[in-house]
Image (tube, helix red, strand yellow):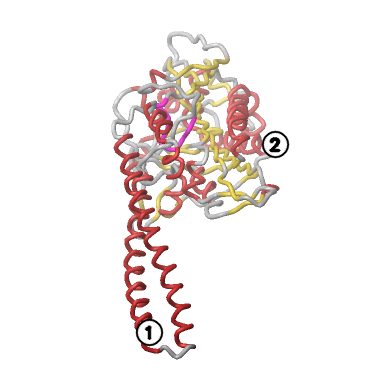
Amino acid sequence: MLQINVIRENVGKVLEGLKKRNMRDAEVLVNEALTVDKIRREKQKEHDDLVGEVNRISKEVGNLMKSGQKQQADEMIAKMASNKKVASELGQELLKAEEELQRVLYLIPNVPADKVPAGKGAEDNLNVYQHGQIPTLPPDVQPHWELIKKYDIIDFDLGNKISGAGFPVYKGKGAKFQRALINFFLEEASRQGYTEIQPPIVVNKASGYGTGQLPDKEGQMYFIAEDELYLIPTAEVPITNLYRDVILNEQDLPIRHVGYTPCFRREAGSWGAHVRGLNRLHQFDKVEIVQIRKAEESYETLEAMCLYVQGLLEKLELPYRKLLLCGGDTGFNSAMTYDLEVYAAAQQRWLEVSSVSNFETFQASRLKLRYKNKEGKTQLLHTLNGSALALPRIVAAILENNQTPDGIRVPKVLVPYTQFEMIDAKL
């Protein structure tokens, strides 16, 4: 959430930044926030002045009573009671103004960083780095949705029977391969100094608002009405919320966490090859890295987190590219995001497998996540997160790129985790 004082003091810069997102109602929302804020501040001054007057009268009443001027004291007491009533009414109006201001602020996305280019959508993202050679495979190669049937490792029909479309069942070597990837990603993160967290996979409304999934993505989250809980779309939500309403000491920083969870998203897939098989699911596994940093460190940290994810892709022998997202494709909460995409040879297309983002103070403002520096001053922190990695499309690319006449070759780095070198018909 943008802080109202930041908007108030930098209106032009905020509006200029939001233009990168192609928001039609940016100026309307910003002006609405400023209008409500003006009313709120006026109510606050009236309320504070009245409270001050009540305190002044209270002292005067005491002096009048001591000097025996009871009639005058009674008149002042009546005036004080009247002021208290008005102050109470103003307090209620102030509370409503504060709630209305928060409602409007929740609708305003983060301002993209200066480095973020303007643009309408994915076609305007910048390819800032590319690694590895695109595999050259024979013409009879199969896409992963055919390979999983051939080797009987993932079953969408069974998942549909049990739950519905988009909920696959992993079997045999498919299940073991999935577990191997999760363990590999967690171990790599631990070696890099991330503390592993196993969080709940349901969160309350306060947590959803804390990291910005609510109200922006309410329709994309599975909701348990009876308990008012949401199934998480990513481990970022529960892990970052560990620090909601927390004031850290400077020596506690930086915070570096990694967590594996299943993730749930209601987003409806359109028809076509780009959403077939593992390309888009309602439930999938993901390992997430989260960092909490001081403001002056966050962009250096963003680059370091990207390099870490790139290293994972290189160890998996996958060709990839790194995209800097334009304003129109940057998520609601993010100030700057890199997407990492791998190439799937049979589909002959790039698949997004990771987003690494810096939210600056946007989430910390909602979370009231702060730290005290050495001088004792309290400041908001910056939050960052990245997929390290999301499994479905990683699996899809490995299956397609490594297919041979004898089966699917397992990347060397994963063999100690899988205990097999090939995915074939044999268990």
Mark 1: amino acid: Gln
Which residue appears at 32% of the width and 40% of the height? 31
Residue identifier under label 1: 72
Return the x and y of residue 241 as percentages of the image width and height.
Answer: 52, 50
- Amino acid carrying label 2: it is Arg
161 or 329, nearer to the observer: 329
Q: Is residue 323 above or below residue 134?
A: below
Using the image, tell me which numbered label, if any, was put on residue 388.
none
**Residue 88 located within the stretch drawn in magenta:** no
Whether residue 162 is visible here, answered yes or no, is: no
| Magenta stretch, overall SS | loop
Q: Is residue 408 visible?
A: yes
- Image position, residue 411 (x, y; %): 61, 23
Label count reads 2
Q: Which residue sits at x=36%, y=64%?
A: 91
Mark earlier in primary sequence (2, 1):
1
- From the viewer's side, name the closer residue of 3 and 352: 3
Q: Quadrant of the C terminus?
A: top right
Name the residue tied to disc 2: 191
Give the x, y percent position of residue 134. Answer: 52, 12
Residue drawn at x 35%, y 58% as measured from the top left: 43
The CA distance from mark 2 to mark 1 is: 77 Å
Q: Quadrant of residue 298?
A: top right
- Of circles 2 and 1, the one toward us is 1
Q: Residue at x 34, y 82 (%)?
A: 75
- Please give left or right for residue 393 compared with residue 242 in the image: left
- Closer to the camera in the image, 214 or 184: 214
Q: Magenta segment range?
A: 327-336
